[in-house]
Amino acid sequence: MKLVITPRSAKSRKFPITLDLVGSPADVRVEDVQNAIATKYPQLYVDRQRLTVEKTALEAGKTLSDYGLKDGDSVTFKDLGPQISWRTVFLIEYGGPLVIHPLVYYLPKLFYGESFEHSWMQTVAYWMVMLHFLKREYETVFVHRFSHGTMPFRNVFKNSAHYHLLSGVNLAYWVYGPWNAEGAKLAERSDALVYGCIALYIFAELSNFHTHVTLRNLRPPGTKIRKIPRGYGFQWVSCPNYFFETLSWLAVSVLTMSWSAHLFFIVAVGQMYIWAVKKHKGYRKEFSDYPRGRKAMFPLVA
């Protein structure tokens, strides 16, 4: 069959083109079309393509007949631009704080113009942040399975700003400064407060890791299968991983009593709640038997 590929932009020099595809519309899959385009223009690899019919995106695994396409019909092509894998994006995002925090913590003279001994509060906060992001890097490499393989490369800078600036530069500079150093009044914390924050942090991080493993086990390797998540945490909310991460950053915020930690906590929790509501609505729309009692992110609340 013949399929006409028309450009979304009138400025395109490569399109329109006509593809000669083997088989009927019921035989030709969307990925066959994408591979044919990539063969003709290697720089337009599959992850870089978006094909639509009357604003409906064509999905891999479906045939052209699923969209009512016939011999001689046309689809619209959009170039999504250079892509980068989500795994690489996560490694870059979480890698920022892992570089920034040690620099500020171990080189105070470079950033504050003086040397000083860090307080117990600063040391505990430092290791909380470092262990959190080391765990996230480990999960990125060994735990997470991504439903989407890539994203536009230009977005990596926007995505990384949240981690590199807010939880990196902002948090490190204001928490590890001389005003919180050993002997400073602002650094005074009771043993009960410090150990309480440590206990909450450990509980939250282990619980967060457990929910990530649960989500991983829902999707067999190499598939995009979606199931209703169940088990620890999921009996309360759709996104317990976000809820437990909230508790982790709450521990850091309470321990440091720093406006910079409070700012990051508010922004991070707000963003996670937006994601949680979106995923919660997606689950309820996709699964007719989705548990009605679950909230999006906060047990019994929202």
Image: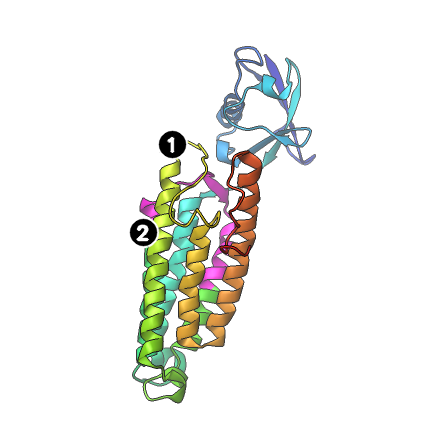
Q: Is residue 145 magenta?
A: yes
Give the number of the disc on residue 222: 1
Q: Marks 1 and 2: CB-CB under 8 Å?
A: no
In the image, residue 54 sits, relative to residue 98, either above or below, namely: above
Q: Mark 2: which amino acid?
A: Tyr
In the image, residue 140 sits, relative to residue 26, either above or below, namely: below
How far from the left and from the top, in percent, is residue 292? Answer: 54, 43
Q: Along the horizontal axis of the image, is 97 left or right of 285? A: left
Q: Which residues are magenta?
A: 137-164
Q: Along the horizontal axis of the image, is 206 left or right of 276? A: left
Residue at x 55%, y 60% (from the top left corner) = 270
Where residue 99 sits, quadrant-wise, is bottom left
Looking at the rendered image, the quarter that the C terminus falls into is bottom right
User: Mark 2 Cα within 10 Å, few/some/many (few <14, many 20+)?
Assistant: few
Residue at x 40%, y 69% (from the top left corner) = 252
Looking at the rendered image, the quarter that the N terminus falls into is top right
Q: Is residue 86 magenta?
A: no
Task: Identify residue for label 2.
Answer: 138
Which colour assignment does the render follow?
rainbow
